Image (cartoon, rainbow, N blue to C red):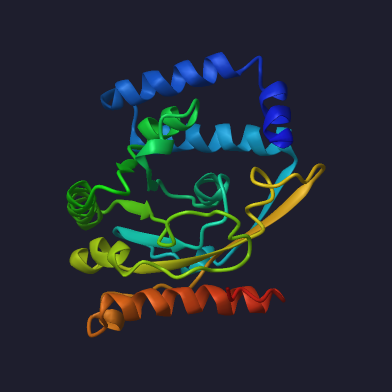
Amino acid sequence: MFRLIVIVFWNLYRIPYMVLKMRYMAKHPERFMELDRYRFAQHEIYCMNKAGKIETEVYGKENLPKEGGYVMYPNHQGKYDATGIIFAHDLPCTFVMDKAKSYQFFVREMVNLLGAKRMELTNIKQGLEIIQEMTKDVKEGKRYIIFSEGGYHKNHNHVQKFKPGSFKAAVRAKAPIVPVCLIDTYKPLNSLTVGRVRTKISFLNPLYYEDYKNMKTPEIAEHVRQAIIDEMKRFGIDGEE
């Protein structure tokens, strides 16, 4: 919470402009290319990182598919996760998040700006509709972030079980599945640490349709989870629960 207060304080003079600009761009997507909206979002994250002394080391960009849509499946640690990936990911992407948390100040603007999906976690019917919309979008070349663990309560660097149902959009779209390893991303906004903080984001080798077409979604979920745990071990971290 303290770091968030610092971020707001150092950006206080620019927040009205940032919010109004994001709202205007989201309301008039016909006037702004997707890449322009995405670059603006990245700039706002840059300002946040600079004020909050947040550093993010990025690995594995060369593993990302060069063309077409795909779905990224990171482990989930905290509020910084999605923004950290967006900052590190060069091409436009968006995300799926809990609808109940999506109307917080500034979060609402980011969700609308990037056309993110609001999912009602207890509404199965609405969840299926989101999966269908994602499938269509990914087939058309859009890139998504979805947190398969669901919540992040005290996950820290321990990877929880991945929900098989979250992989249905990628499977139905026959799209690449990209595991993403997050390390220490809970520290910026979900811990009491002060001073400079360093996080790591690693894009791992994707699973293409040919790799997983004979696998069930529980098998895919465990494969992705294990790939993230193995990457954590490469950095000397035991990611097991």
Q: How many marks?
A: 0
Whether residue 100 sits left or right of residue 74 in the image: it is: left
Q: At which x and y percent is residue 2?
A: 73, 34
**Closer-to-camera residue (172/209):** 172
Whether residue 183 sits left or right of residue 159 in the image: it is: right
Q: Residue at x 36, y 53 (%)?
A: 144
Q: Residue at x 44, y 24 (%)?
A: 22
148 relative to 133, above or below = below
Q: Residue at x 82, y 42 (%)?
A: 195
214 relative to 239, above or below = below
Q: At which x and y percent is residue 196?
A: 80, 45
Q: At which x and y percent is residue 62?
A: 51, 67
Quarter of the rendering occupied by the C terminus:
bottom right
Whether residue 217 sits left or right of residue 185 in the image: it is: left
40 relative to 68, above or below = above
The single residue placed furthest to the bottom in the displayed view is: 214
Q: At which x and y percent is residue 24?
A: 38, 18
The single residue placed furthest to the right in the displayed view is: 195
Q: Residue at x 17, y 53 (%)?
A: 132
Quarter of the rendering occupied by the N terminus:
top right
